[in-house]
Image (cartoon, grey):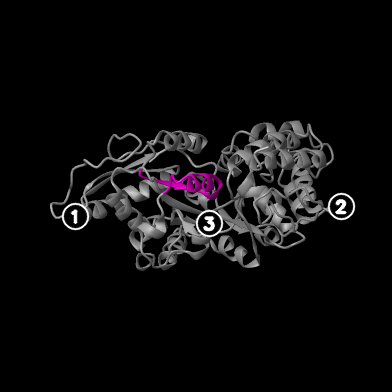
């Protein structure tokens, strides 16, 4: 989860069970006189909905163990800088969420708890193997699987479809082809893009600068957009050694297609609105100004709570290589500098176990990375009248991995500095993609 993975667009607020600062304390009071562990620890994550779910589930754990868990939520935009600074200062929270973009460096620097040493195999029942593999560095696991992404899908506004005469069945056949003059993704999103005069992007006289409703959310969005286009065109983002490898014929085609949706066909918001605002497209969808919103399960709860129109989900548009979605997991890592190692270990076991994992699933917040309770997530959404099967079924067609490796966060920042200009239409796509890859790899190679 990404999340932006993970989790671009998650609403943020500070939630705490009690006032606390980064870093755990071994002096917290016990709420259970029979506790053998006790004390106080801090748990940090970026998702307010997940924080709320954990908060509701924790009283039983706290009563049983005597451990007080102080929850911090830090906005995604600030999360990684704050975490990096706290880790460097030795004041990191006892337990914190992390994704694979910000992981290897901490593990190799000895800043994370060695899970293989801390938690025996008999305490790992149901842990998702894909998450274990993703967060194993040099043969050692440094994080407890917390949640995993289903695939990416396309959320639709049924009212806007009906106005345009587009059916849900048509959406199920969405496809794109960079080598064709047209395709169903371009044709349908043009019908769904409307200017202030009521003309669609498919009509003569359409005025792009007066657009009041967009068809689709093409943008410089790693998880929701361009990784899926790369994979669906047979390209990759990184090679097996972790170097960026999207500057290929197929990779350039994928980026050119996305940029054309914005600047040539005008079916997606300008990059001037989306480049530095990961919430923009989601907010446009919730406001009824975006007909199709390509995103992941990390936005389900927000859409459920915020949409006042009928909506649903279909699978990704099919590319030349099929429907290839990114998938990713999030783990709870332990700080090697924790002052309450016993409580830290106990809490990590709870997060990875059925009780902690189901806290996320049964509230619909996220798909647990414990296979024993993953049905809690699908059951929750079924009870809400939402069919989430398109987000799960797409994974059977193949996946593209989330960004990984040491220095990958810095590499992505360097590449995005170039790609922002590409998406704005100020830099040629082929030249920009080559320059972006070169800039990112220079960070990875420490050149």
Horizontal and vertical percent position of residue 392 = 56, 63
Compared across the picture, whether 70 is left or right of 126 comes to left
Q: Are marks 3 and 1 in contact (CB under 8 Å)?
A: no
Magenta span: 94-112
**At x 77% / y 47%, what residue is drawn?**
247
Mark 3 — residue? 138
Depth check: give the residue in front, 325 or 339.
Answer: 339
Compared across the picture, whether 346 is left or right of 368 comes to left
Mark 1 — residue? 36
Say if 71 sits above or below 331 in the image: above
**Which image quadrant for residue 433?**
top right
Q: Nearer the viewer, mark 1 or mark 2?
A: 1
Depth check: give the residue in front, 105 or 312.
Answer: 105
Q: CA distance from mark 2 to mark 3?
A: 47 Å
**From this viewpoint, is residue 98 visible?**
yes
The mark that comes first in sequence, 2 or 3, is 3
Horizontal and vertical percent position of residue 376 = 41, 63
Question: What SS does tag 2 mark?
Answer: loop
* Neighbour tally class for label 2: few under 14, some 14-19, many 20 plus, Cα within 10 Å: few
Horizontal and vertical percent position of residue 289 = 62, 40
Q: Nearer the viewer, mark 3 or mark 1?
A: 3
Q: Pick out the residue farthest to the left.
A: 33
Compared across the picture, whether 374 is left or right of 149 comes to left
The mark that comes first in sequence, 1 or 2, is 1
**At x 46% / y 55%, what residue is drawn?**
366
Q: Pick out the residue farthest to the right.
A: 181
**At x 68% / y 31%, what residue is drawn?**
272
The mark that comes first in sequence, 3 or 1, is 1
């Amino acid at each position: 989860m990404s999340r932006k993975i993970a989790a671009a667009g998650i609403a943020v607020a500070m939630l705490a069970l009690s006032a606390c600062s980064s870093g755990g304390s071994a002096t917290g009071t016990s709420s259970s006189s029979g506790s053998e562990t006790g004390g106080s620890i801090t748990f940090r994550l970026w998702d307010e909905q997940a924080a709320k779910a954990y908060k509701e589930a924790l009283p039983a754990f706290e009563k049983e163990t005597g451990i007080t868990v102080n929850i911090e939520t830090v906005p995604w935009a600030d999360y990684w800088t704050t975490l990096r600074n706290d880790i460097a200062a030795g004041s990191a929270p006892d337990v914190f969420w992390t994704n694979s973009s910000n992981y290897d460096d901490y593990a190799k620097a000895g800043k994370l708890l060695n899970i293989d040493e801390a938690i025996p195999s008999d305490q790992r029942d149901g842990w998702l193997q894909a998450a274990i593999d993703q967060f194993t560095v040099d043969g050692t696991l440094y994080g407890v699987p917390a949640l995993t992404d289903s695939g990416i899908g396309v959320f639709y506004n049924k009212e806007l479809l009906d106005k345009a005469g587009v059916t849900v069945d048509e959406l199920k056949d969405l496809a794109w082809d960079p080598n064709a003059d047209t395709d169903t993704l371009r044709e349908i999103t043009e019908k769904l893009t409307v200017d202030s005069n009521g003309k669609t992007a498919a009509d003569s006289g359409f005025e792009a600068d007066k657009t009041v409703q967009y068809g689709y959310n093409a943008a410089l969005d790693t998880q929701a957009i361009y990784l899926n286009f790369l994979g669906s065109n047979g390209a990759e983002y990184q090679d097996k050694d972790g170097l960026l490898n999207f500057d290929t014929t197929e990779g350039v085609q994928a980026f050119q297609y996305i940029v054309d949706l914005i600047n040539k066909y005008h079916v997606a918001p300008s990059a001037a609105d989306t480049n530095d605002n990961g919430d923009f497209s989601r907010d446009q969808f919730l406001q009824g100004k975006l007909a199709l919103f390509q995103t992941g399960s990390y936005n389900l709860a927000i859409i459920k709570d915020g949409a006042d129109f009928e909506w649903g989900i279909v699978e990704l548009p099919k590319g030349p290589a099929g429907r290839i979605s990114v998938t990713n997991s999030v783990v709870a890592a332990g700080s090697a500098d924790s002052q309450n190692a016993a409580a830290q270990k106990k809490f990590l076991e709870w997060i990875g176990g059925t009780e902690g994992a189901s806290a996320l699933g049964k509230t619909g917040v996220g798909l647990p990375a414990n296979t024993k309770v993953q049905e809690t997530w699908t059951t929750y959404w079924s009870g809400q009248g939402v069919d989430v099967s398109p987000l799960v079924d797409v994974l059977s067609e193949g996946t593209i991995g989330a960004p990984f490796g040491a220095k990958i966060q810095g590499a992505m920042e360097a590449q995005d500095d170039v790609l922002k200009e590409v998406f704005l239409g100020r830099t040629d796509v082929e030249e920009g993609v080559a320059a972006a890859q070169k800039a990112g790899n220079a960070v990875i190679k420490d050149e």
